[in-house]
Every structure is written in structure tokens, then in C-alpha cells.
Image (tube, grey):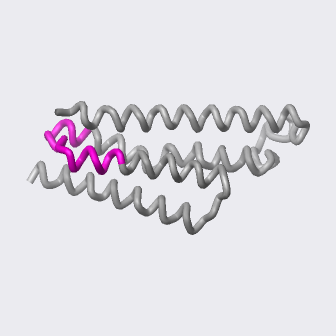
Amino acid sequence: MTLKLIYPALAMILWIFVVAVILMLRRKDAFASGAVKTSDVSLSTERYPAPARLASANFSNQFETPVVFFALIMLAMEVGATGYAMAVLAWLYVATRVIHTLIHIGPNKLPLRGAVYGIGVIALFGMWIGVLLAVL
């Protein structure tokens, strides 16, 4: 049943919206506190304080490997690779994106963030293998 894969895809989309709101709030705080003026950031976002820059970097991250995730979800649904293993891998990937964000915009511990990112990439690779096996 393809619904098993719809839910993690919808959750990932929701998470992207959550990160967008975090970014908006952090940028709003930067303006409200006087840390930046519009003229400071009209050409480049480098003048935003670190919390806003981290949220911006994480928002950009939501359009990197998640693109592969969404492609794999669609391919899996098309070829019928929608079993429980694929659903578990999809949910694992979504969980790693949430955890990655929380680390990135929080303590920003690079080794931990990198490990979580790596687990997410492994989940994506597993999904790719699942799609590949379904078409062979």
C-alpha cells in the first residue's frame, strides 16, 4: 500500500515548513534586536547573526538530499517498492533530517551532525536499493 510512503513524504514536507518558520523567526529577531538592518542584508546574508545564518543554512539543506528522498518515494510508489522495509527507511530518513536540524540550529556539534547526516544518506541508499530490486 503506497500510503506507507505518503506519510513520511508529508512529514518531510511539514518539516521543511517548520524550518522555514524557524528561519523567519530568527531573521525577524535579528531585525527587531537591531543586529541587522535591511541594508546590511539586501545583497548578502552574511551580516545576519549566527542563529539566523544557521537556520538559513539548514533551510538550504532541506533542498539537497531531500530532493533524492522525494524522487525515491515517487519511484518506489511507481514500481511497487512500498513494503515495510521501504517505509522504515523513509521514516528513518525523515527522523535524521529532524535530528540534523535540531543539532544544526542548536549546539551545532559538527561530528554529531555529520553522523546523523550519514545515517540519513545510508537510509536513502537503502531506499535506492529497494527501488532497484523492484525493477530488476
State which quarter of the image contains the N terminus.
top left
Which quarter of the picture shows residue 43? top right
Residue 68: % across, % down: 37, 48
Q: Position of residue 59 (x, y in %)?
A: 58, 43
Q: Is residue 28 left or right of residue 15?
A: right
Left or right side of 123 for 135: left
Classified by dominant secondary structure, the portion drawn in magenta counts as helix
- Whether residue 83 appears in magenta in the rendering, the answer is yes
**What is the x, y in percent for residue 129?**
21, 57
Residue at image position (53%, 53%) is 100
Check the image and name the residue furthest to the bottom.
Answer: 111
Give the quadrant of the C terminus: bottom left
Quick one: which residue is furthest to the left in this view?
A: 136
Which residue is pictured at 52% across the width and 64% down the height?
Answer: 114
Asked whether, in this view, residue 116 is left or right of residue 125, the answer is right
Q: Quadrant of residue 82 in the image?
A: top left
Q: Which residues are magenta?
A: 74-91
Relative vertical location of residue 19 with respect to residue 115 in this rendering, above or below:
above
Which x, y percent locates residue 9?
36, 36
Name the residue located 32 percent from the left edge and 42 percent from the top edge: 71
Which residue is found at the position 21% from the left and 33% from the top? 2
